[in-house]
Image (spheres, rainbow, N blue to C red):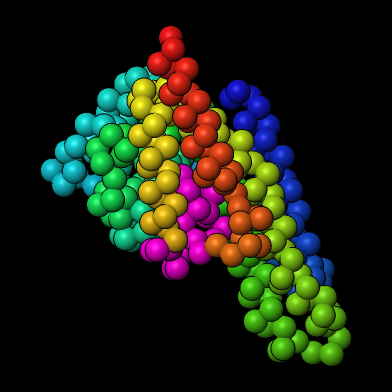
């Protein structure tokens, strides 16, 4: 599993690097390609070593002290012991949108972040199910792959958006404006599709691992249903959609196209699988 995830990480870093270079070339020609390649190399190195810090900073996450959330600490410590991984630092994201994510390059360098909204919405058992899911990601060593993909997909989106913004300021010898507009539209979509390709299966795996860790698959299922409803009522509006794959459920407003390209499997499918797990637990 560790080798497979490492290989996937290298492959997707290469694909997203190539996409960044192509977008740079569309907007800046050969010079743009060179600049984009150098930028991509820096981002690759930075996202490997500092992906957790980048993701946490992007969401204005702040460390939570034990005195602020003793129950939260107790749950994380208990689950980490069961998973046989170090206890990760815990962060709070200041938003009422209910959600959570794990990040980091390995179990020894990971972190768990929860939103203020999820602490208000879920019961203790449901919160334990969510945290078990997130520590499942850490235990399965897929947080590095997901975080790097999210960071680099965010870079592609940023370059494309900035390129479109400056399209009108280029001289007549610049690239075709229609090509630039097309790149600005389709480059973020391509980045999202790459992100999508690595995210759906890992959510099912983390659901299963989390349910085994906490022994409460139905509580995790209830939490997923509540989070999805809560995210529709109180979606995140001030974060880059490229980071959607980090979260336990998609935190952004969803139309039909957004659902089609969602980095998460349908919540009802996840709930059905968890209900099946619960039935199997009761029959053994």
Task: Give the quadrant of the N terminus.
Answer: top right
Image-based side of 102 in relation to 200, left or right: left
Can the viewer see residue 42? no
Give the residue at x 69% y 52%: 193
Give the residue at x 30% y 55%: 117
- Identify the magenta region: 233-253
Q: Nearer the viewer, residue 141 or 186?
A: 186
Q: Residue 37 appears at what percent x and percent y? A: 72, 58
- Magenta segment's dominant SS is loop
Q: Nearer the viewer, residue 38 or 60?
A: 60
The answer to whether 174 is drawn above or below residue 91 in the figure is below
Q: Quadrant of the rendered structure where residue 166 is? A: bottom right
Image-based side of 83 in relation to 156, left or right: left
Can the viewer see residue 96? yes
Residue lying furthest left in this view?
67
Q: Nearer the viewer, residue 119 or 107?
A: 119
Image-based side of 192 in relation to 126, left or right: right
Residue lying furthest top in this view?
284
Q: Residue 40 appears at what percent x and percent y? A: 66, 56
């Amino acid at each position: 599993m560790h080798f497979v995830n490492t290989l996937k990480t290298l492959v997707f870093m290469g694909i997203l690097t190539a996409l960044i270079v192509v977008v740079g070339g569309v907007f800046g020609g050969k010079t743009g390609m060179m600049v984009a390649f150098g930028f991509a190399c820096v981002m690759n190195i930075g996202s490997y070593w500092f992906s957790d810090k980048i993701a946490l900073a992007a969401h204005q996450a702040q460390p939570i002290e034990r005195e602020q959330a003793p129950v939260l600490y107790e749950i994380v410590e208990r689950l980490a012991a069961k998973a046989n991984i170090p206890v990760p630092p815990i962060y709070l994201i200041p938003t009422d949108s209910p959600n959570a994510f794990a990040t980091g390059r390995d179990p020894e360098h990971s972190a768990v972040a929860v939103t203020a909204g999820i602490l208000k919405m879920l019961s203790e058992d449901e919160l334990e199910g969510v945290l078990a899911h997130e520590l499942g990601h850490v235990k399965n060593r897929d947080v590095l792959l997901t975080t790097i993909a999210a960071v680099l997909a965010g870079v592609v989106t940023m370059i494309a958006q900035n390129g479109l913004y400056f399209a009108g300021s280029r001289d007549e010898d610049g690239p075709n404006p229609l090509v630039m507009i097309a790149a600005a539209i389709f480059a973020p979509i391509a980045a999202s599709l790459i992100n999508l390709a690595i995210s759906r299966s890992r959510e099912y795996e983390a659901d299963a691992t989390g349910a085994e860790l906490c022994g409460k698959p139905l509580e995790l299922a209830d939490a997923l249903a509540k989070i999805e409803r809560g995210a529709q009522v109180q979606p995140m509006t001030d974060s880059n959609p490229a980071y959607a794959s980090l979260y336990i459920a998609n935190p952004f407003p969803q139309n039909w196209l957004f659902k089609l390209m969602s980095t998460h499997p349908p919540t009802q499918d996840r709930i059905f699988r968890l209900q099946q797990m619960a039935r199997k637990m009761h029959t053994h």
